[in-house]
Amino acid sequence: MGEEARGSGIQPGATGLPEQGRRFAYAPAPESREIVRLRERYDLFVDGRWVEPKAGRTFTTIDPATEEPLAEVAEAGEEDVDLAVRAAAEAYETRWRDLPGKERAKYLFRIARALQERSREFAVLETLNNGKPIKESRDVDVPLAAAHFFYHAGWADKLEYAFPGRRPRPLGVAAQIVPWNFPLLMCAWKLAPALATGNTAVLKPASTTPLTALLLAEVIEEAELPPGVVNVVTGPGGRTGEYLARHPGVAKVAFTGSTAVGKVLRRALAGSGKRLTLELGGKAANIVFEDAPIDQAIEGIVNGIFFNQGEVCCAGSRLFVQESVADLVTEKLKARLATLRVGDPLDKNTDVGAINNRGQLEKIRELVRSGVEEGAEIYQPPCELPERGFWFPPTLFTNVSMSHRIAREEIFGPVLSILTFRTPAEAVEKANNTEYGLSAGVWTEKGSRILWMAERVKAGVVWGEHVQPVRPVRTLRRVQGERLRARGRPPRPRGLPRSRGREAVSERLPVRRTAKLFIGGAFPRSESGRSYEVLAPDGRLLAHAARASRKDLRDAVRAARAAQPGWAGLTAYHRGQILYRVAELMEGRRGQFEAELADAGSRDPRREVEVAIDRWVWYAGWADKFAQVLGGTNPVAGPYFNFTVPEPMGVVGIVAPREDPLLGLVSRLAPAIVSGNAAVALASEPAPLPAVSLAEVLATSDVPPGAVNILTGLTAELVPWLAGHMDVNAIDVTGVPADLLAQVDELATENMKRIVRAPDADPFSERAESPYEITVLTEFKTVWHPIGA
């Protein structure tokens, strides 16, 4: 497009001119479409099988950027829809409804994992079929789709907490009808909660964007979801969608799309007794006050309307600017629009891709013409559009009246209308002058004004934006790099065959295992150089374990203190993913853990490993939910807004119980770290080897170095040092012998450590698995904020 260079990755054009005065252009950065293996024809996915449509009809789906055909897709008729609903109903009754929540969760976790593993394939296919820029598919749509499956998998066995006082029950067969603007993400939005709660589904993607839904069906098939739990039928909404919504076997209809179609659906289902969820149009308002950080507001405004070509129900298509800064905001917006790159959606530099379909393009054009005819002033930056495909340039209107169609009707395209206001009250009046109430944004540096506006603007979601410096959070890549530097040369993977000498030997002296400490992501020997014998109940020598010294414990606390801010700084979703990864790795080493527990005399090695893995999964599911259960707003008397925010305590000391050495440790460690605490754990003295193997799992997972440290040694030596350490904020005494408890209580008084213990000594009990075990190692901050204009 010929813009001057504004960032990295820009190459000088080969103009032959001297360096001074050259124009710079973005070099093409195309994503390969070869990552996608398109079928020539896609059938329907019904009852776990791919089946041809009964009537034999198909339709062609195309690439909106080029108008080239991508594939032939089956069109489901009334008989096909009936078969899909019947399959879903049978699966609901016989395979899914009564399946335990934790088992349903495992299927959803599988789907989430597959989406992550095949993310590039999904992103390219989404861009090919939808027209959105690849960087949006790659960085937003696919990761969020995986996140939804992961999030709702975590709720599948926790529904009693989501609906306190009520016993939740599934409805039956859910008809899921999704639009073309976020084809994959909307599938996840619809399917994940339905499946987590025990419903089965018949999914109908939009006829212009069916391909990622069909690829998702492949993932569902590979995840071995029971047949009929999810069925995918394709075809036009006016026929296939109507057959599905009206089918008597459907208990719930969830529809996202246009307001007009939503009204038709509601009338059609009136009196049927079916549950109906509608997510329809929007005409969101962005409100910019004169004290707003203008440059940041410009970026927010541009993202709000030009993201996904404006094909977003909550797109900020109306911009209200305080009169004193209206000219400044308008000029900055025009300058910013000139830098947007419109073109090939598969190019990683593209900002605005193709409109999804010809009908939508014509609607945008017609509304823009009406804006010009009604007297608004149009601005479009210089922009060379491709000759083929459905394209519309970024557009803004000034001199817009509230009576103009472009200010009242949903455009669903890259078109922004700018209006002005003088007072906050006027801004509220104008923002509320619409039939829509989906979302709004407020830009100001006054937090009290944000709350005042949020109270009065009639919108379901209000984004309040004011900017302040924040401490950067360590990225996962940086955390991994730090781990590698801390560990030096990576250890040889377990289980690989060792090289043998030239002569075969019939007997050999086994290499005896010496278990090391786990501190800061590395495996050092004890600073003291001492170890102790680990014996089986029958007296066999199993290994030598490091005998941690006081200095080793200080090193572990120091590592935990350094790692805790970065661990807490990760998003809750990210922490949950990492804990789920720990469960995955333990699953892969199940045999090793069972053997170690059997040697240690475990009462049920197989069950202990199984429950320990499930416990990681259970608490991983709480990572991004416990704040919802435990935090929130509080009623107060006075002009204040009051809310409670849970925060991690810091460094937690954990003493694992002597019995059930793996499950006992996991049951105390998982709830301690899920909220962002770091931990220093003391392994079971008589049976430390499962804890050392757990440390090896943690070292190969994405848990940051130092977030968890595990020491082996003599309990009577280590517990008093841990209880008296001034940099430990809390201590879990579940595994502390009774004769040491009084000493722990006295030593913990010096820095007022919180002392906690398991509610039940048996880690196999139901009480050992509770979100309230997270609460006991969580601080609660109450925030008061004045309300006023």
Image: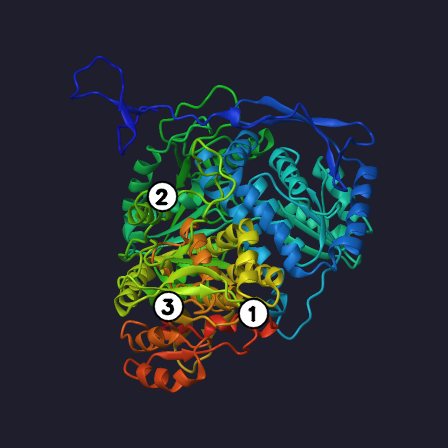
Colour scheme:
rainbow
Q: Is residue 145 visible?
A: yes
- Tell me the mark number nearer the camera, choosing from 3 and 1: 3
Q: The N terminus appears in which quarter of the rendering?
A: top left
Looking at marks 1 and 2 on the same chain, the residue that comes earlier in the sequence is marked by 2
Q: The C terminus appears in which quarter of the rendering?
A: bottom left
Mark 2 neighbour class, 10 Å CA radius: few under 14, some 14 to 19, many 20 or more: few
Please name the residue that numbered disc 3 is placed on: 713
Amino acid under disc 2: Pro
**Residue ID at (33%, 75%):** 717
Amino acid under disc 3: Gly
Q: Position of residue 269 (x, y in %)?
A: 76, 53
Looking at marks 3 and 2 on the same chain, the residue that comes earlier in the sequence is marked by 2
Q: Position of residue 270 (x, y in %)?
A: 77, 56
Q: CA distance from mark 3 to mark 2?
A: 25 Å
Q: Position of residue 20 (x, y in %)?
A: 15, 21
Task: Identify whether 122 is placed above or below 203.
Answer: above
Please name the residue that numbered disc 2 is placed on: 490
Amino acid under disc 1: Glu
Q: Which mark is residue 600?
A: none
Please name the residue that numbered disc 1 is placed on: 769
Closer to us: 765 or 272: 765
Q: Is residue 366 visible?
A: no
- Tell me the mark number nearer the camera, choosing from 1 and 2: 2
**Residue ID at (82%, 47%):** 86
Q: CA distance from mark 1 to mark 2?
A: 35 Å
